[in-house]
Amino acid sequence: MTTPSPAAGPARRGPALTSLLVLVTVLAVVWSALAVAPAPARAVPPDGVPIEVALDAIDPAVAGPDTELTVTGTIRNVTEQPVRVDTVRVSTAYRGLDTPTAVAGWADGDLGESVDTPLVVGEARIEADLAPGAVVNFRTVVDEEALAPPFGFATLPLRVEAVAGTGEDGAPATGEVVGGLRSFLPWDAQTGEEYRPIRVSWLVPVTLPPTPDLLSSDAATREAAWTAATGPDSATRRLLSELAGTAVTFLVDPALVSPPAPVPTLAPPEDTGEGTEEEPPGETTGPSATESPTTESPTTESPTTEPSATGPSATGSPTAAGQATDPAATQPPGDGAPATETGPDTDPPAEDDDTTTEAPGTAPEVPGTPEDGAGLRRAIGEVDPDRLWWLPAGDLDLVALLDLGMTPEEIAPLSRRSNPPADGAAELLATGRHNIAWPALDTVTEDTLAALSAVWASATSEGGTPEETAPLAGAVVPGSSVTGDRALLGDAVSVHPDGTALLGFDERLSAMVAGVDSADGSGVVSQRLIAELLALYQEQPAAERSLLIALPRNHGVSPEALGALYGATADLPWAQAVPLQDLVEDAGSQDGQTRLVPAAPDGEGTTEEDPGAYPSTPSSPLTTARIDLVEETRATLAGVGEVVPEGVAGARSWDGVLDQLYSVRWRFNEGGWTEPLLAAQALSTEIVDGIHVNPTTINFLADEGLIQITVVNELPVTVSDLTLTVRPRNPRLRIVEQPEPIQIGPSSRATVQFRARALASGEVEVETELSTPSGTMLADQQLMRVNVRPTGVWIYWVLGGVAGIILVLGVWRALRPRRSGAQGAATPQTTDGDGDGTDERSTEH
């Protein structure tokens, strides 16, 4: 036996200890790295379903024997952290959803666990960690042999689920479901079956969005809005393109083909040069009876213009522009000519060179309609006239106006009034139908129908084209508003006893179509609509029935999604798309026993809104006060337009804007309703504030004479036919003759005179009002102060005093004592140079 050396143990343990230390160090480094590394992504976050599944399409939409299906869609991570998705799984069950209740129950999840889908018919491998917000497309194929239900005609439930996990050895995926949706798969294995399909009509409104910029007076803003609403890339144009050549009926607002072009101002600048300075402030005093009779009196002349330095934005203190003129003043005689009396009947002198009469300027160029308008008119013109129906002009809110107490006679002109039609629009508006109403109501009653018929009857009595004057032929109403046997039998169109066709649309299916752009994808809506039609057909397969799908006015549906939905349902064995005109014509043979529901008492009929129900109609922004304001603005614009060049045409360009404030579309944007009205009011205010009377103080020192005041025009255009009315507030002064109509040049002023008579002394306030020929008031009322000093009060005292003085002087002179005797004439004497005073007489011898 060999004994190991004592030194051998430690020598061998050295390498082992070193290796152990190295291993510990490596493990420590790895542990530290793991400690600071990010945690792995959780497959399912704790709050809700992380993956949103959308179904784009099932092609073909109806399954059958030996049919291969392709299911496409998307999955999206709606959380803020990565989510693992391995498989998208498609499954079904052999259970028929044969009634509308069963279809709705499966779609809404009301059937609960009573319907399971254990049969997996297709899978798509994803195997990815989806980042937050990431979207992944999927596509899976259902083989021909995958489906073999034991019945020939039914709708199968379908599930599409995102699964975090995979199956082993080709088995269906298992794991946690992180997202999914429910859909439908119609199954038709019948051969040689004769169907009586449900006739399905589609009604799509084509109206303008509630955008105030469409009515803007700024050409660039307006054209941008119209391009967005009706241009080549707009939803309107794409909608017409997607549904071209189909059986869809369009209900079009005539405003689409007759856009307004309101002028931005009624007073575009004229090129008239600079104005002159105004007179400084002060009082103007007329001649008094104490003035010299040689004082010249101003002659009476028609108002003339005087350029003023004040423009539309000029401000300053008022100037004294009034002057009283005594008609008894005389012109001083010259060269022995007799004095000539001057007054209001004398011929006016030649006008001063600085006084000009401005000719009316040319009207501003009215911006044209967008270039895209012609393309839209062509697109509408390509629609079959039987499928082209017109709403009242501007989609007039007939219901709101009737509720506010307007009579049918008052509403009828609005229903026909529209903007001047653009090129080709008149011919287009002469096609199609104009006698269909679509009241903006959730429930239409007998009273509503009677009022609508009266509106159309009033419009008919006013004349027009045959299309425009046709009496009311039909009304689009919710199907729930229609009662009677025909409605119970499933006819979408029935006849009222008064002969009006009631076009009752299916609210539930229409709401479903309006939701085609939901997060679940258009494929879900398409498959459900097919399933709903199949369930309706199975209720009465031998009956001839019809159904109307009407999109709400503000549907906002993607044209492409709507086109795909229509295409998937237009030609089914159990449902056929037909023009609505066909249903209206077929209903003409009915006996007319259909009625509308009676009006519900106040406070009744309101229920909690179903998220999947047909959109309720918002309230109208129209009130009695707002209607009055619109019409007052219209009248003011028309009035102020009378005094500026081309103002009448400019004001008329705003009629279409104001008319469209009565549109149904403002129910969907009440806040935008006021913008066009404020713009119209600003246009009239520009004229009203630009013309005014210069306030002044006048000394009127006559019994009767002419008073002169100044009217200022701060606008850059000539104003004509102004009427100035003066009214004293005190009987001390009486107006004998009002001023003549006034014309004032751009940024100028005119001196206006009128005849007045003084009855007593004192200060009198005189109201001045400027108006147009039609009586529209311009500017605020101005007050002048007139110091009245009639000559009849003091002149007679003066004359009497003078006469008394003359009389006293005459008496005094008559009574003055005369000098006694008269001195004789002095005898002439000659004095010689000596001064002796000798009287030398000459004697003739």
Image: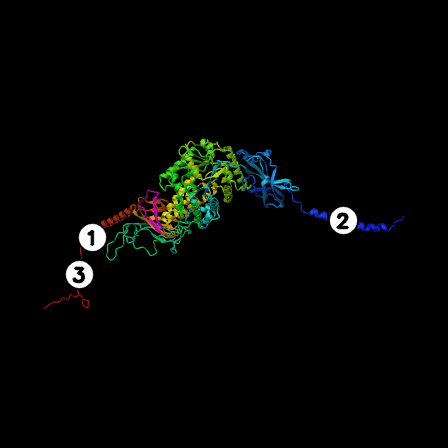
Residue bearing mark 2? 23
Q: How far is mark 1 from mark 2, CA to CA?
A: 168 Å
User: In the depicted view, which residue is nearer to us: 640 or 844?
Assistant: 640
Asked whether 330 falls inside the magenta stretch, the response is: no
Tell me the amino acid under the disc marked 3. Answer: Ala
Tell me the amino acid under the disc marked 1. Answer: Arg
Mark on residue 818?
Answer: 1
Question: Is residue 389 at least partly visible in the picture?
Answer: no
Q: How far is mark 2 from mark 3, CA to CA?
A: 179 Å
Give yes or no for contact between labels 2 and 3 (Cβ–Cβ under 8 Å): no
User: In the depicted view, which residue is nearer to us: 409 or 434?
Assistant: 434
Q: In the rendered view of the protein, which quadrant contains the C terminus?
A: bottom left
| Vertical placement of residue 682 versus 150, above or below | below
- What is the secondary structure assignment of the residue under circle 1? loop
- Residue 130 percent across, percent down from the top left: 61, 45
Badge 1 local density, few (<14 within 10 Å), some, or many (20+)? few
* 66 displayed left or right of 717: right
- Start and end of the magenta stretch? 719-744
Give yes or no for contact between labels 3 and 1 (Cβ–Cβ under 8 Å): no
In primary-sequence order, the first of circles 1 and 2 is 2
Which SS type dominates the magenta stretch? strand
